[in-house]
Structures are given as structure tokens and as C-alpha cells.
Image: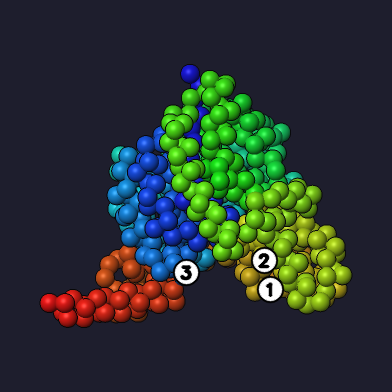
Amino acid sequence: MKKVQLTETVLRDANQSLMATRLPYADYEGILSEMDKAGYYSIECWGGATFDSCLRYLGEDPWERLRNLRKNLPNSRLQMLLRGQNLLGYKHYHDDVVEKFIELSIKNGIDVIRIFDALNDFRNIETALNATKKYATEKTIASGCISYTQSPVHTVDKYIEMCKELQKMGFDTICLKDMAGTMSPYEAEHLIKGIKDAIGDMTLILHTHCTTGMAYMTLTKAIESGIDVIDTATSCFSGGTSQPATESMFYALSQYGIDTGLNEDIINKVNDYFKPIKQKYIDNGQLNPKSLGTDAQALVYKVPGGMLSNMIANLTDMHAMDKFDDALAEIPKVRADLGYPPLVTPLSQMVGNQAVTNVLIGERYKNISKEVKNYIKGEYGIAPAPIDAELSKMVLGEDEPVDCRIEDQKRTGEEFTAAREALGDLCRSEEDVMSYICYPDQTLNFLKDRKAKEENEAIYTIEEM
Ligand code: CO
């Protein structure tokens, strides 16, 4: 019997895409024991923006959340998303910090680590892969993830090459990550057939979003073309900027006689549980119904929805909305000049802002942002295609792009020691140090609050005696 398995994303990506990752652990603890029996391939529940959101907004220790998830989902594969050498932050950390982070993630309960780099520069995911292998248990899966985008250089052949590279590096599975939801059914068919031919029986996963309205068609073609695992969200948290619905995909697959391993009663129970939670966040404004709609503009402009709304906000602030069409037309040109980076954080912001600047000044690259300069210098990794020679010369002069970044990563001890010292007696564990390294200000506030709470509790305890 043909088999396609499903990863449930409600706790991470659906939560992140629809309500800015503000779902507190307490809201879903009550359904975890049921979810544990659903038969998902994995439950995506940690990493991505959950870590930042715990510390910044929810007053939760992300590590404690992970340990609680582990305790209440003893039979499930717990999955996280990791930005390679950036971990869950926005800069390149040293190799020893990356290694320690992964050691602790596995120790606290993670099974599947999905690792990606915004530029698909696989040097940026190598340390994370090696650490995953080093600390792996028999349940650990290292998943190599490709940021999907469209451009003249992003051909089917190029993606097949990337997949072969990930296989050679030693990843256990491969995931295609279509963060903007722009992969069409036609593209999915050609891509997945080509990749499956090249990588044999290695597990291939498709992650997409409903943003542009194509996801169900794309998943259907992906299934016909041999995909092994798809990402879905329980139906009340599906659609819009989130994933396609778990129960609907289950229903469709069942009629084809494709085995998902899912328990129908339980996946329906999971949805029933989340319905009032969704309503609560619609009522308090944290879940904007706008994010549940379909926005096909990304297909026309090849610009993700979030990037478009950012640009409109910026131009409105500057009273320059009359330049909107010009700025929109400038985006693909800037992206081509920069060697067609995937438009994902932080590249989407960098490309968008540079396009706006070019149009507002009326002269291209008269003013180049610091981030774009660093990108051209090679600090983010290697661009998918060569950067425009003239632009490169404007930034580098006669210099060659020097890749000091990789050498820099090899320095060890410094980041960890400095973080531990900065925390002083607030620090209880290596996990605290890791939180601080990723989000210093938020972690400091969180740990100060934790200490204050404990001191209060200590006073109460004495009085009660
Ligand atoms: Co996603």
C-alpha cells in the first residue's frame, strides 16, 4: 500500500503564520496526550520563532516548554526548525555554540532537526548537521532543508544538484521549504519526480503554505509524483498564510487508498480542541482574519505577501506611495543584481529596502545599505548566481570578497564564556546561556523576572510555615 505521512504544524508554523507565534504552552497542554496517539509522522512544535516568542512575549522558558512537550508526547517525533549557523537568532554563531545548542535540543527532547540556510549555502548548515550526528539518539533525524524560490538560475537541475549534495553530506531526509507558497502544481511535479529519481528511496518532504491559493493543488501533484511526507495543520488553524488542512488531506488520501497512518477520530478531536482557542484569539485581535485569506499577488510579482505589506507601510510613512509601482518593478532587478537570493528573512527586507531606496533617490545604488554591502562582501554566504559585476565593484573596489566568516566561526569558547559571565547569578543552566546568546535582552528580562518570582515565593513559603 502506498504511504504518505503527515507532519502536524499547529504548534509551530501554523501558530507562527497565523498569530505571530503567540500561542502559550498552557493553551494546548490539554490536547497533547491525544495528539500523541494521532499517528503523525512528526509534530513540529519548537524552533522557528517559538523560542523568541516564549522569551519576548509569553514569559515562558523555551527549554522548559520543550521538556513539557517531551513529557506529554512520549511516543511522537518532536520536530524543530533551525536556521543553520544562525540557530534561532539572526547572526552567525561560532561553531561551538551551534554544537552546544544542538546537544541541548536533543537532550531536552527534540527528535527531528530540520536545518536550512536562507541562501542555500550548505556550508552554513554543515556544523549543525555534524552536531546532530554527534549527539543523535536512535530516534534523531537530521533533515536537510532547501529554501525554495523561483529565478532563471533556480532550475529543476539545480535543485536536483542541491538534493544530491544534501544526501552526500549525510542528511537522513530532505525537505523542500516553499515559505512563500509560490510552488505551482506544475513545478512540484517536475521537481519531485526529478529529485526522487536522483536520491532513490531517501525520504522527501514538502513544506508549503496556502498563501497564494495553490497549496492543495501542489500537494496533490506532489503526492502523485512520489512525495513521502507533507506538512499540514489541523483544519481550524489551516489555510491562508498557514498550511493545508490535516483532516482534508487525510480524507482525500484515504479515497486513493494511500495510507497516512492517522487515526481519524483523534485528528478530529484535535481540531475540536483548537476551535475555541482560535476563536479566543480572533476575538482579542491576535489572530487577524486577513491572514486566513488568499493573496495571489506573490505569483505576479514574485514577492512574498509580508514583503509587499512592509513596502506599502514604508512608502506610506514617507508619503511616497506614488512610487509604489516603480518600487515594485525595481524589486526583481535588485534581486537579479544580487544573484537571485530567495526572498526570505533577512534577504526579503534587504532587497525590498534597497529597491525603495533606488527609486526614491532616483539613481540606482547611490545609497547602499550596510546589510546589502555585507551581503556583497560575502558575509551571509555565497549568492545563488554571480552578483552584478558593476555593483560588486562599487562595494568592494579592487578587493575580492573575502570569506572571513567561516574562519571566524571556528573560534571557540568566547561567545559562551562571555554570555555566562554576563548572566552572573541569574544563570542556572547551559540552557539559560544559550537563550542569552540568541536573545540577550529578552533573556535577561526573563531571568530577572524568574528570580524575582522565586524570591516572592520563598517569602510566602516562610510566612505560611
Ligand atoms: Co513555513
Q: Earlier in the sequence, mark 3 or mark 2?
A: 3
Q: Nearer the viewer, residue 41 or 364?
A: 41
Q: Secondary structure at mark 3?
A: helix
- How far, Cα to Cα, is label 1 from label 3? 30 Å
State which mark lies toward you, 1 or 2: 2
The quarter of the rendered structure image containing the C terminus is bottom left
- Identify the image's colour scheme: rainbow, by chain, secondary structure or one colour: rainbow
Q: Secondary structure at mark 2?
A: helix
Q: Secondary structure at mark 1?
A: loop
Q: Residue at x 16, y 77 (%)?
A: 464
Coordinates of residue 409 in the picture (x, y in percent): 44, 64
Q: Earlier in the sequence, mark 1 or mark 2?
A: 2
Residue that carries the numbered disc 1 in the rendered image: 369
State which mark lies toward you, 1 or 3: 3
Coordinates of residue 188 in the picture (x, y in percent): 65, 35
**Quarter assignment of residue 345:** bottom right
Q: Is residue 218 left or right of residue 36?
A: right
Tell me the tag on residue 57. Answer: 3
Q: Nearer the viewer, residue 78 or 329?
A: 78
Residue that carries the numbered disc 2 in the rendered image: 350
